Image: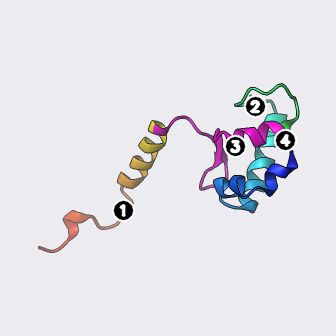
Amino acid sequence: MLDEFREDDIVRKVGGRFKLSTLVQKRMVALNRGAQPLVDLPTRDLMEIVIEEVKQDKIYLDTSGRVQPVQDESEKVDALEALLTEDDGGPGVDDLPD
């Protein structure tokens, strides 16, 4: 089971060993506190559950370091578009000189 952590695929998927460690730790805390697993496995071993969730792209760390479930691609695209179109208070295209 811990051999998965030695594979570069899972490390690259998450964005590095530190992020993988953070993701695993935070997700295990959530599962210990009663969060529902996002995969069906015939085990109660939380480490195996978390590893499988990562391998199946069910969870990720957001930019603030919180574990988030992956909903579906359309929701991710909508969230990204909202960020890109959000007014940050800076100059816009209309502020350019003629």
Residue where numbered disc 1 is placed: 89
In the structure shown, which secondary structural element does the residue marked by tag 2 occupy? loop
Q: Nearer the viewer, residue 98 or 61?
A: 61
Q: Disc 3 marks which amino acid?
A: Lys
Which mark identifies residue 47?
4
Q: Amino acid at mark 2?
A: Ala
> Residue drawn 81% across and 57% down?
6
Q: Is residue 5 magenta?
A: no
Q: Nearer the viewer, mark 4 or mark 3?
A: 3
Residue tagged 2: 35
Residue 78 percent across, percent down from the top left: 42, 42
The magenta-colored residue range is 47-73
| Foreground tag (1 vs 4) | 4
Secondary structure under tag 4 reads helix
Residue at the image position 20 percent from the left and 64 percent from the top:
94
Q: What's the CA distance linking mark 1 and mark 2?
A: 38 Å
Say which label, 1 or 4, has the lower sequence index.
4
Whether tag 4 and tag 2 are in contact, CB under 8 A, the answer is no
Q: CA distance from mark 1 to mark 4?
A: 44 Å
Q: Residue furthest left?
A: 98
Q: Which mark is residue 55?
A: 3
* Mark 1 in CB contact with mark 4 (< 8 angstroms): no
Q: Who is closer to the viewer here, 95 or 22?
A: 22
Q: Is residue 68 left or right of residue 90?
A: right
Q: Earlier in the sequence, mark 1 or mark 2?
A: 2
